[in-house]
Image (tube, rainbow, N blue to C red):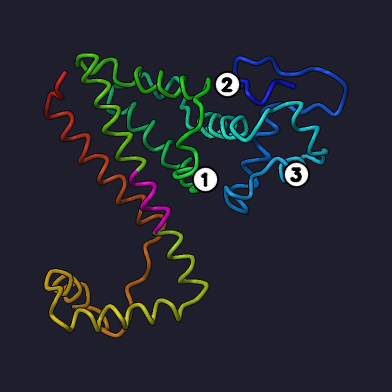
């Protein structure tokens, strides 16, 4: 077992070989992701992962040194799912970066906790493969290296921000479905605030949306399909703007 003070990333350490039971890094990452998806990121501990694998906690330390290694494995496993096929990279830069954006958002929404919990993860081989794919996607855009990097950053920012807001909307919709009284109470509060006249812009939007509806009835919550359509419209508008200008570089 490597020293706790060893600061090298797990990727430079050889995978241990020895007597059974033997666990791969993929198995450990898979167990950690299952726990995070079902119980939240804070539930991911050495003890809990060992239990998921059916192993003793000390056995797990034979394969990973600490929580930092676990987080690195989880991050790399998620990015493995973000990777797209080589065929998807062979079209124009816009189609290629769109394919990456869609896949990235889909994976982030499958693991919504990752949007806030893996920011300090040590990058691994799949992070490098993902970045390599992003560079390959825009290689034929005719832009300078600096402009290509900025294009990737702009799209990444949009995807991560959209995924975060979509995850929040879906969580609120789920909570509302489980307790409709919450929705009723919040709508009543909101309508009362609008009647004060302190929120003229919000009031105008509300009145427009209620034109063809019963004013006492709440608007249905955003669905995953509606959020995806919104993402697609925004992504294409963003790419339209990027295609129409040369980023500095």
What residue sits right under mark 2 in the picture? 7
N-term-proximal mark, 1 vs 2? 2
What residue sits right under mark 3 in the picture? 52
How packed is label 3: few (under 14 Cα within 10 Å), some, or many (20 or more)? some
Q: CA separation, marks 1 and 2?
A: 27 Å
Whether residues under marks 1 and 2 lie with C-beta atoms below 8 angstroms apart, the answer is: no
Q: CA separation, marks 3 and 2?
A: 27 Å
Whether residues under marks 3 and 2 lie with C-beta atoms below 8 angstroms apart, the answer is: no
How packed is label 1: few (under 14 Cα within 10 Å), some, or many (20 or more)? some
In-image side of 235 versus 3 (left or right):
left
In-image side of 65 versus 244 (left or right):
right
Q: Is residue 19 above or below residue 40?
A: above
Q: Is residue 115 above or below residue 249?
A: below
Q: Residue at x 43, y 64 (%)?
A: 172
Tell which tag, 1 or 2, sits nearer the viewer.
2
* Horizontal and vertical percent position of residue 27: 70, 32
Q: Is residue 178 above or below residue 107?
A: below
Could you tell me which secondary element the residue under label 2 belongs to? loop
Q: Residue at x 57, y 21 (%)?
A: 7
Q: CA separation, marks 3 and 1?
A: 18 Å
Based on the displayed image, in which of its 4 quarters is residue 190 positioned? bottom left
Could you tell me which secondary element the residue under label 3 belongs to? helix
Could you tell me which secondary element the residue under label 1 belongs to? loop
In-image side of 136 versus 142 (left or right):
right
* Horizontal and vertical percent position of residue 86: 45, 19
Q: Bounds of the magenta span?
A: 161-168
């Amino acid at each position: 077992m490597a020293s706790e003070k060893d600061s090298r990333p797990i990727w430079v350490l050889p995978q241990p070989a020895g007597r059974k039971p033997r666990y791969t890094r993929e198995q450990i990452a898979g167990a950690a992701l299952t726990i995070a998806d079902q119980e939240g990121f804070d539930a991911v501990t050495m003890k809990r992962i060992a239990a998921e694998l059916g192993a003793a906690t000390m056995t797990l330390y034979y394969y990973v040194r600490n929580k930092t290694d676990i987080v690195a494995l989880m991050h790399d496993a998620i990015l493995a799912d973000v990777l797209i096929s080589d065929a998807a990279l062979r079209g124009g830069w816009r189609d290629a970066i769109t394919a990456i954006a869609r896949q990235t958002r889909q994976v982030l929404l499958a693991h919504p906790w990752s949007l806030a919990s893996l920011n300090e993860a040590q990058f691994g081989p799949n992070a490098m493969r993902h970045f390599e794919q992003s560079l390959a996607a825009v290689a034929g855009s005719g832009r300078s290296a600096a402009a290509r990097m900025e294009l990737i950053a702009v799209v990444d920012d949009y995807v991560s921000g959209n995924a975060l807001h979509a995850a929040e909307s879906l969580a609120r919709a789920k909570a509302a479905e489980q307790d409709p009284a919450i929705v009723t109470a919040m709508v009543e509060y909101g309508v009362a605030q609008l009647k004060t006249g302190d929120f003229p812009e919000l009031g105008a939007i509300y009145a427009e949306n209620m034109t063809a509806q019963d004013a006492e009835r709440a608007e249905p919550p955003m669905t995953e399909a509606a959020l995806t359509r919104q993402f697609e419209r925004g992504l294409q508008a963003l790419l339209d703007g990027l295609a129409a200008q040369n980023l500095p570089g």
